[in-house]
Structures are given as C-alpha cells and as structure tokens.
Amino acid sequence: MKTAIIGTGNMGAGLARRLAGKRDLILASRNGAAAKSIAEEIGSSSAPIATAVAEADIVVLALPYGSALEFAGSEALEGKILIDITNPLKPDFSGLLFANETSAAEQIQSNAKGAKVVKAFNTIFAELFAASPDQTVTIPVFLAGDEDAVEISAALVRDAGFAVEKIGSLDAARLLEPLGMLNIRLGYGLGRGTRIAPKWAVVQG
Amino acid sequence: MKTAIIGTGNMGAGLARRLAGKRDLILASRNGAAAKSIAEEIGSSSAPIATAVAEADIVVLALPYGSALEFAGSEALEGKILIDITNPLKPDFSGLLFANETSAAEQIQSNAKGAKVVKAFNTIFAELFAASPDQTVTIPVFLAGDEDAVEISAALVRDAGFAVEKIGSLDAARLLEPLGMLNIRLGYGLGRGTRIAPKWAVVQG
C-alpha cells in the first residue's frame, strides 16, 4: 500500500519522518520544493499533488481544515482512504467553528466523493513526532470512520509509533474534535506545552 | 465551610463517602430517607433540601442535567458556590443535547442568580469513588468557572482524593462536556468499563 502525505508543515513533515522506512511514502505539497527536500531527507519520493493522490491508497491530509476541505472537493479521491487530522478552529483559535451537530471529518467526507474519510491524529501535537517512538507507544491516536478503513489506518498509526484507540463511526469526530481543542487549550492557553496528549487511565482497586 | 450534596444517586452518595470526615457535610435529596441513611452511614447530617442549601457555602448538584437546571432556577442560591457535575445527555444517551455554543454549566449558571457555578467531576464515573483514593490521586477532575470559586472547589476536589486540572472560565464546559460524553462512550458503548478516566500524559524524550 502506498501512502501519500499532503502538506509539509510540522504535522506532515513530522508524520513523514515517523513513517520513513516503514511505509511506501510519497510526499506532496503546494510547496513542491519542501516536499522534495523532506523526501530526500527521509529517502522517500515526492510528486505533484495530483500524481501523489493518483498513486496512493491512503492519503493523509496534513493541512489546516479549510485547505483540507477544499482539497477533498477538488481532487480525484474515488476509492482512497483519506485521513483527516484537522481541528476546525475559529480564525482566532478561541474555539471550534462547530461541534456536536457536525464535524470537520464529516464535512470533508461530504466533499470527498467515493473516498472513505478516517479521523486520526487530531489530538497529537506535531512535537510528539520528534519524541522517541518508545515514549509515544502508549499515547493513543483516536480513530473514527468506516470499520475497514479504520483498520487499515490503524496499521499506519502503529507504524508511526502510537497506540490505537477506535472510537466508532465518523460522527465520533464530533467528540474527538472538542478533545483536540481542549488539548490545544491546555497546551497553549494554559501553558502545559506541546509535549502533552490525552489518554484514558484505568483505575485499579 | 459547609458543603451540601444534593442527590443520593451513585454520584452523590459516592462523593459523600469520599468527603466523609474531611468536610462538614449536609446531605439532601427528594428522597429524604436515602439522604438520612447515607448521612448516618458516614457520620454526617442530612436535612430537607431548602435547609441544606441555606446552611451551605458550597452546593454540589449531584443530579441529572434536567433536574440540576430546574434546581438552579427554584432554590435560593445567592452567594453560594454551585458545583455542576452533569453531562447534558440526549434522552437516548447517543450524544449531547448541545455543545460548542453553550454548555450545561452555562445553562445552570443562567438559572442560578447570584451563585457562582463551577463545572467539576463530569468526567469521573461514580465507580471511581469506590476505589482507594491512592488510586485516584493522579486522576484529574477538570474545573471551569470563576477563578475564586474554582480555587475553593479545588480544595474539595483534593479532599475527595483527585488531582485538580483547571481549564479556565465557565465556557470551557463547552469542551469538558464533550469530554464527559466521550468518556461515557468509551466506558459503555465501546466496552472499556467504568473504571476509566481521561487525563493528559506528558511525553518525555
């Protein structure tokens, strides 16, 4: 299976480095030079966006929400698994554009005809990709979407050095995106930094 | 300071047992016999609801959302700290009645004239109150509300054997309630059980 990563910001580049040597990767970005540079660094390939999408089975949208939504509506994604990592932040980062009634993942799905959207990585700060995988192997990536698509995406999550926490169908993104927003608030507004991540503890006794 | 706990369901009774001997407690419920029975068990007092509220500085609403909202609009709460532990679940438990635009905590605040509402304990399953406090001392209770009221409530949280995680002003309940809903979904729908709780991990290295 070939995985395209679209976007070479902190999330895209960080995930690409985590998956290098474990996945057949193809990197793409509007900034083609950045994609080429990171691809060379990690020994993978890069291509124009349309080519990367055409060749890939899994397309990771490492883009802000607005760009991801536009991408989903303009590229040929039939039959692809589309991984949405976004949090639909308000322009001033004070909260989410929406929640509860819909989600970024569902909005992207409604644009991405014939693709299966999976929500993932939206509670993972880019800085965690720079940590040793030994340190993140118990940190969950929360997954929501079509069951088969989630199963395929779960293998990618494990290859990236994270634990898998399946939350159900895509509408569970209505809860995962507020969790992502709370994570951002804790990390930035409340000064906990960007080495944190939400997980569930099990209480004994 | 006197703390009234209103409601003798699993949450109210569990919290009362946790606070017994550490707080000056007064228990009250529409089911006065249940309040009396639990008060006798833990060596605290019980009273009719209006009396308990009148005597207390802190009033914990251990009630479902609808009842808590009604309570907030009908009792004399001027000058009290009102702790709201609810998640505003849809009748079929499939999700929240609302989120993002408002929260149960803010709805309760709008009814509770002259009181300061603090959001707390909405991500804590009642079963955790039965665990040893040693096992929950690192489990966070997320607090949102007026800064002084949160500080006073934080002492109660610590007395109950939990860690304190302050999230900001009351509108942060718009994120904490979806977190409570996700906790419920993981615990029940996804079979993780009711010994779980969300917390934030810090990644090293």
Image (spheres, coloured by chain):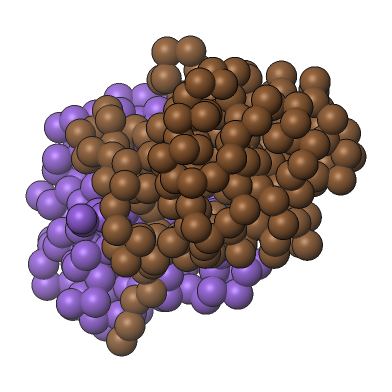
Chain colours: A brown, B purple
Q: Is residue A202 left or right of residue A103?
A: left
Q: Position of residue A187 (x, y in %)?
A: 29, 37
Foreground residue, B198 or A112? A112
Labels in figure, total = 0
For image coordinates 59% across by 40% down, the residue present is: A45
Q: Position of residue B203 (x, y in %)?
A: 26, 55
The answer to which image quadrant residue A99 occupies is top right
In the displayed structure, A81 sits above or below B76; it is below
Q: Look at 40% across and 28% down and name the residue there.
A: B171
Q: Is residue B187 above or below residue A181?
A: below
Give the position of the C terminus of chain A as an image quadrant.
bottom left
Camera-nearest residue between A103 and B177: A103
The x, y position of residue B102, in whole percent, is 52, 27
Query: Looking at the image, which residue is at 23% across and 38% down?
Result: A193
Residue A93: give x, y in percent of width and height: 42, 20
Q: Is residue B93 visible?
A: no
* Residue B130 vs residue B184, the one in the foreground: B184
- Residue at horizontal 39 percent and vertical 66 percent from the top: A137
For this orientation, the residue located farthest to the bottom is A205
Left or right of residue B111, residue A119 in this image: right
The answer to whether residue B63 is above or below residue A108 is: below
Q: Is residue A49 above or below residue A122?
A: above
Outermost residue toward the top in this view:
A91
Q: Nearer the viewer, residue A202 or B52?
A: A202
Q: Is residue A121 visible?
A: yes
Q: Quadrant of the N terminus of chain A?
A: bottom right
